[in-house]
Image: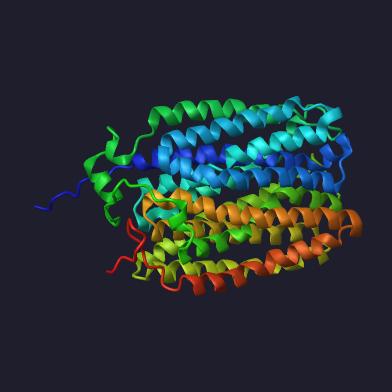
Amino acid sequence: MTERTPKIGNYRYRILALVFMATTINYFDRSIIGVMAPTLQKLFDWTNKDYAAIMVSFKIAYGIGLLFMGGIIDRFGTKIGYTISVAVWSIFGMLHAIVTSAFSLVGFIVARFGLGIGESGNFPAAIKTVAEWFPKKDRAFATGIFDASTSVGAILAPFIVGAIVSVNGDNWQIPFLITGALSSLWVILWLKTYQKPEEHPKLSKEELAYINSDSEEENTEKIAWVKLLPKRETWAFALTTLTDGVWWFYLFWGAKFLSDQFGVDINNIGLPFLIIFIMADAGSLLGGLASGALIKKGWTINKARKITMLVCAIIILPVAFVPVIASKWLAVFLIGLAAAGHQSWSINGYTLVSDVFPKKAIASVIGIGKMVGVAVAIIADISLGAVLDTAGNSGYFWAFMIAGFSYILILGFVHLLMPKMTPLDDNLNFIVS
């Protein structure tokens, strides 16, 4: 008689669903201003430099937040750390709605700064949650699932904003208030649901064993940043985040580009964004599935992750030609293809951290790396705003050129820094297999 294989269970996917929800809210909140950018510029009489200053405020705060939010999450745990992050960004997200015309520039700069502090905790907490709840062989796919929610948030923003806000700016405050209600619901669900796997009363022994099936047992001693900074692996991951500036360019400047180049207004931005970010969602899922499938076929983690990232870099290249394309829909398709490549690149980049570092250091390493990406994105925003004000739309030519060719160059340097992706133990020494 054949013995039945015990069911593993799938409670880990309930936790992943909450991470998906949080990241959707995060990107809906983050995307609102990009969708309304052409309208708000006219309403408040902002220059491109003014708009760039608002974007830079968010990114400076995001970078500062990454200095300590990852450490807070590693120190106090995912449950408390994630809650703090969501609460802070929700408060400042709603504060946008009380900004007056007389103080619009300063008010938005302050509100975006607070939003950046809070939102800086989302990805360190999300990646740490995946590392706690999924074995290594499934982490890229799990990361792909929750990372797809960034596109869901970006897709929802133009449709909700377009339905509520008029071209002349009436009701612009309401979308900023919607996220507060959603975030409050999320915090209640998270505090009620989340525990570490080994402490969770609803997790079966079989599922816990599966989660820990390819992970080394770790001690609880914390790892200080000063020990992480000298590691080549930390900086290899940091290099992969330099492309965050490209993603934020699509998110915060995409509606402006389509408005400046093709005359797309707030009531017509929904369909182009839907195409771009559905393609991005497909990239998130396929990128996670691809590297995971290669690992299951016997490829090393090192080879599977890097080959997947190389394919991503290659399919992104055509976006460099977007500014010289006359067809709006071909431009939208190429941006969508690049967004798909970026999302696949990004989730495989994130899993490099959980593949190499012990779980207790993951949020801190993510924080260090994302901070580097933010610094580059700040320089890009300032430069683009200045060029658009002085030289017109020619600034988009250089932005898309960098967006197209940066990935393949970065991957080469990542391989030089971390050629074998050898895992590190609790003391950050190589684990000899």
In this view, the residue in front, 88 or 97, is 88
Placement of 202 over or under 230, stated as above or below: above
Q: Residue at x 86, y 41 (%)?
A: 46
The residue lying toward the viewer, choosing from 344 and 372, is 372
Question: Residue 91 versus residue 282: which sits nearer the camera?
Answer: 91
Query: Residue 236 appears at what percent x and percent y?
Result: 51, 65
Answer with left or right where residue 131 lies relative to residue 64.
left
Task: State whether residue 169 appears in this view.
Answer: yes
Q: Quadrant of the C terminus?
A: bottom left
In the rendered image, which quarter is residue 42 located in? top right
Give the residue at x 69% y 49%. 251
Q: Residue at x 58, y 32 (%)?
A: 88
Q: Left or right: 188 with respect to 31? A: left
Look at the image and tell me whether residue 261 can be seen: no
Q: Position of residue 375 (x, y in %)?
A: 65, 54
Q: Locate residue 36, reporting x and y percent.
A: 77, 39
Q: Position of residue 257 (x, y in %)?
A: 80, 53
- The image shows residue 318, relative to residue 278, as above or below, that is below
Is residue 24 positioned above or below 169 on the image?
A: below
In percent of the image, x 86 and y 49: which residue is there?
263
The coloring applied to the image is: rainbow
